Image: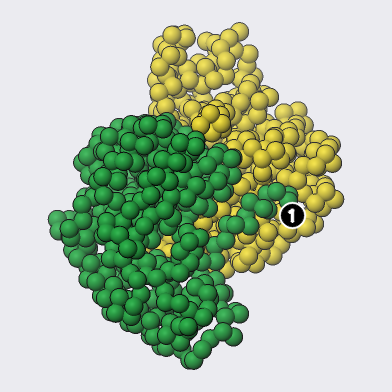
Chain colours: A green, B yellow
Amino acid sequence: MQDIRERFINLGIDFAPGQEGSLEDKISALAVGGNIPGAPVDFSHGDVDAFTPSPGAFEAFQRGVQEGGQQAYTEYSGRLSIREVLAQRLTNFTGASIAPSPEMIITPGTQGALFLAMAACVGAGDHVAIVQPDYFANRKLVEFFGGVVRPVRLDYEDKSPAMLNLDQLEEAFHSGVKTFVFSNPNNPTGVVYTAEQIRSIAELANTYDATVIVDQLYSRLRYEGTQYTHLRASGINPDNCLTIMGPSKTESLSGYRLGVAFGSASVISRMEKTQAIVSLRAPGYNQAVLDTYFNEPEGWLDERILGHQAIRDDLVRLFTEAGYATRVPEAGSYLFPRLPDLNVGTEEFVKLARLQTNVTVTPGAEFSPLHGHSIRLNYSQDRNNAVAAVERLIELAKRYTR
Amino acid sequence: MQDIRERFINLGIDFAPGQEGSLEDKISALAVGGNIPGAPVDFSHGDVDAFTPSPGAFEAFQRGVQEGGQQAYTEYSGRLSIREVLAQRLTNFTGASIAPSPEMIITPGTQGALFLAMAACVGAGDHVAIVQPDYFANRKLVEFFGGVVRPVRLDYEDKSPAMLNLDQLEEAFHSGVKTFVFSNPNNPTGVVYTAEQIRSIAELANTYDATVIVDQLYSRLRYEGTQYTHLRASGINPDNCLTIMGPSKTESLSGYRLGVAFGSASVISRMEKTQAIVSLRAPGYNQAVLDTYFNEPEGWLDERILGHQAIRDDLVRLFTEAGYATRVPEAGSYLFPRLPDLNVGTEEFVKLARLQTNVTVTPGAEFSPLHGHSIRLNYSQDRNNAVAAVERLIELAKRYTR
């Protein structure tokens, strides 16, 4: 059993978003000063009580239950009639056609889609190109399947537009890397890649016959003035591109755990076989909720974007005034400010913040070994609570600033 | 990419239960005679319209939705308050205590639990003891993780009680096998292991420090006169035993995809880390449905058992009268009759049955390479339809009997 236990050593979850443990046990000895009271805010994930599930979701679920057996037991890739509707909507959204079968699979959340996609593409010893920083699970998934991470830097702090290091990506492909995974908008920075960069990624993938998995979970929540380019509509060979989306974030349907992957038929065929042994299918009744996805009432999305934009602007202003280097997110609901120089480590500060201010944030090291100086906040929260929480956080940090 | 594609060659899903494809394309050329009309019956899984979800499930889900964020985002191992209640109920049911943390994890279906358990225990090159025949995914999971199957025979056709080959199990452990996976009641035969056999398994696991994963999905649906023994209450070291259950079958809650694994804290800790990258958690709202599990109205379970027992007796009689060797299931809702000698292969016959009689069954080879002569029927169906379907199946088989 020695080997199998080693698989889990680097698979820590203490700081994984949404995972709350008894982290405070040893940290109180480090605390300076008393607590700064205020309403608790958990920035590690969005607050679906502040931004509520998109209209009609529960009713769609109820209709699924009423349909009985045919909705309870669907194909492993999801009920065909649902995929048919969704394929048309996502074709319209992304600007490139999708065949509901075999180019689409419904999964238990976008996490489920990402896991299956990595299972379909990464074997022991395979090198996989991953952006630094990017979604925390990308690295863990590569390691879980015995692969090796090949980092590709994203320069987001000083550059506008942010710049992905395409030379590193080409070097990786040139040396035999066959899979590249990235999120667009980027998690945790809120960067949206330019059309030029996306086209370059497509060209490199075609040249080196590499598969690109693009996590577009936040691609609907785009702020004013942001131009968004879909990789799958940028000249990449269709079988080399897999796109992942889902209604957990912008739509606040995370309690239903729904995701969808579409594109490469060969990758999806392997994902389907894997889903058959991982979880069989996304819960049948839950799949029915996808009826509401890309089918929200007129004006609903605009309102949701404006609601997030207001919070974004408040928090960016607070952090910037306090001297934290903070890029303004172009999309999504993540902020990734760089902490001042502290006399405690970032992970300790994160624990202290939870203990002393009732504010939960995610340490930057979850997203890249190079970004331990930053923290991530999901600001899909009640606006007033979020502002007050960031004020407390900044006040607390002063106590620990060198 | 060569290697990764090979991972999927043996991971076929054409005959996996619930997976309906265009299997009929080439089969019509083989068909003898016309179709035998009748209501379609899909014996590959239970019919939740015939045996409906246990009372209050939807209302429990609705309460979960109404609870909002705290039910949408739970710990990866499932909401603690739900685990606390469930741990007490399953302690009572199994006769050995369970700590809700760290000895329990809620998963997306029992399939999800089985996948995570295998991920936690099986590494590349590890040999894993598997019963022949047993649940089809056991073999596939071992192979997915790069392990090697060590078969342990179950003699169920001629023996009452059925006999697991404990010598083979001990040989496997003696040669270094560290994991044994089996279902009790056995899927596909409906065998319930005797107290003596379960105690022997416990002793062997203790002697060789092996982990035993026991899938007890059907352990509530026990017919009159059946004595059931829980492995975890049979003297096995608690950290060497993981039990998997869930409300998808007896309770017909498969549309909610809920499972639970309990026992070994070390295995569950690795499962939790894996769940964090596989699907994060069982859908939050769905977890609330577990409130109904082991909490059904007085008399509900007895009635459900009697309903299945009546169908079991009907179908066993039909198959036996037609000369098919058919063991009477002691629990569960699976029947595994041996086909007469046919002049087509079992998989072809299964396709012909779907084409000519509108009856779907699962070929025995899914459960063991040695049991291709049999077919599995999940008889959790409408009774009249099930009887008529088996009559059609037997009539059809006559056309292809040598």
Q: Position of residue A380 (x, y in %)?
A: 31, 67
Horizontal relation, residue B286 to residue B113: left or right: left
Return the residue nearer the eye: B276 or A226.
A226
Q: How many marks?
A: 1
Which quadrant would the C terminus of chain B be assigned to in this image?
Answer: top right
Horizontal relation, residue B351 to residue A49: left or right: right
Horizontal relation, residue B303 to residue A384: left or right: right
Q: Position of residue A387 (x, y in %)?
A: 30, 79
Q: Position of residue B345 (x, y in %)?
A: 57, 15
Residue located farthest toward the left when viewing the structure as drawn: A298
Question: Residue at (67%, 32%) from the top-left corner?
Answer: B133
Horizontal relation, residue A222 to residue B308: left or right: left
**What chain is tagged by disc 1?**
B
Dot 1: what SS?
helix
Q: Is residue A129 above or below residue B72?
A: above
Question: Residue at (36%, 57%) from the top-left corner?
Answer: A155
Q: Is residue B66 visible?
A: no
Callout 1 environment at 10 Å: few (<14), some (14 to 19), or many (20+)?
A: many
Q: Is residue B50 above or below residue A313?
A: above
Question: Residue at (24%, 71%) from the top-left corner?
Answer: A313
The answer to which quarter of the image holds residue A381 is bottom left
Q: Is residue A232 visible?
A: yes
Question: Which amino acid type is shown beneath numbered disc 1?
Answer: Asn
Report which residue position mark 1 lands on.
B240
Return the residue nearer the eye: A82 or A314.
A314
Q: Position of residue A139 (x, y in %)?
A: 50, 52
Question: Residue at (31%, 66%) from the top-left corner?
Answer: A327
Return the residue nearer the eye: A62 or A384.
A384
Return the residue nearer the eye: B40 or A308.
A308
Q: Is residue A248 above or below residue A38?
A: above
